[in-house]
Image (cartoon, rainbow, N blue to C red):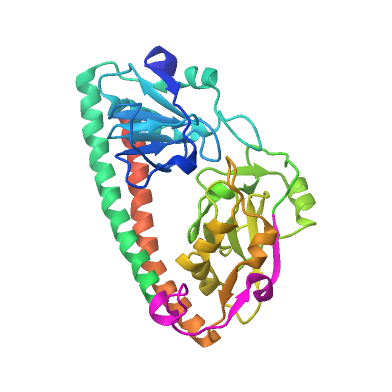
Amino acid sequence: MRVKLKDITKFSKGTQINGKNLIDDGAYSYLNGGINPSGKWNEFNVSENTVTISEGGNSSGYVNYMNDAFWCGAHCYYLYDGPKNSKYLYYALKSQQERLFRIRSGACMPNIKKSDLGNFIIEYEKDEVRQEEVVKVLEKCELLIEDYNKKLTLLDEAVRARFVEMFGDLRINDKGWKYYKLDELTELITDGEHATPKRTTQGIYLLSARNVLNHQLSLEDVDFIDCDEFDRISRRIIPKEGDVLISCSGSIGRCCIVPKNIKFQMVRSIALLRFKSNINPVFAEYMITSDYLQNQINKSKTASSQANLFQGKIKSLKGVVPPLELQNQFASFVQEIDKSRLRELLAIKQIKLLLNDSWLLLY
């Protein structure tokens, strides 16, 4: 049957903790919205086995499940006094992840209002035995996804190890490369549209920082614009294959290359770097995600409730220029690894489709 969320569970936001006060060796995770915990704390305000929904920011609407007790921040809803089988409620909401993203309001800082969340409708099975059957099926699918993600992690580690093998640890520069500012290594450093674009329900992709992950674009939660709006924004910049994108708001410093055959525009929370011909974009991408550049980025971000990385700071970041032949050899290695990565990602996608299909078949 279909029910409103407020009719089967209660929900509330947590209490904010200043990020500067978080402690590295805290016993409990601090979840303040977002996809992952943002630190540790020495107390908890929410018990284990709890469903959470991010309230604000680029990830507002994201459904999570906390197996252990944790401290919930003010930008995160936690659900309580709901079904005895909280994992069932998690799967019921997770199956509607895209719909939850669509109830967000606000352009610059999206959020989900409590009233909208309470009126959110889901499919709900009252029979507790049936709920347990559903959870068992979907947990098996999640275990498969976890195994594939472990394989992806090993592939990522192989690429990082090859980078250090070929170019050294850039933090100590044991290869003796000369440092250059990124402004010297690029033809162009800019960002996306500053005005609020007119969004549509379909059309051309409009990317924001949440769509830029390390070494890949995520199009699972993406906005759209029409052709007229695309043409207007394109008077400023047209992204093209081989450009390097950096997330500059919220979770800053994530980096990927613009792939083939994708047409999009972007908002100001993304920076675009177009490197000169003596820099292979694949090398540049992994240089930016190296500890050396990430440390610089963290020092350059603004200190506010929402971290930002501005163009001037990006231009001042320092990188190196190994011989192009060496860069190309690294890019070829990455290309081979990407073939294996693609197989694992396709397997994960198929299992996620099975998850959705299983949920529908159970009703």
- Depth check, front residue: 312 or 7: 312
x and y percentages locating residue 29 in the rendered image: 35, 39
- Depth check, front residue: 245 or 354: 245
Quarter of the picture containing the C terminus is top left
Give me the residue at 64% from left, 43% from top: 224
- Depth check, front residue: 32 or 5: 32
The answer to whether 359 appears left or right of 266 in the picture is: left
| Residue 312 showing in the rendered view | yes
x and y percentages locating residue 331 in the rendered image: 47, 76
Residue 184 lies in the magenta stretch: yes
Residue 36 lies in the magenta stretch: no
The answer to whether 273 appears left or right of 125 in the picture is: right
- Decide: is 146 above or below 159: above
Range of magenta residues: 163-191
x and y percentages locating residue 241 in the rendered image: 61, 66
- Decide: is 94 above or below 237: above
Q: How many marks?
A: 0
The answer to whether 55 appears left or right of 25 in the picture is: right
| Residue 290 showing in the rendered view | no
The answer to whether 125 appears left or right of 275 in the picture is: left
Give me the residue at 48% from left, 18% from top: 118
Quarter of the picture containing the N terminus is top left
x and y percentages locating residue 314 in the rendered image: 64, 62
Q: Quadrant of residue 140?
A: top left
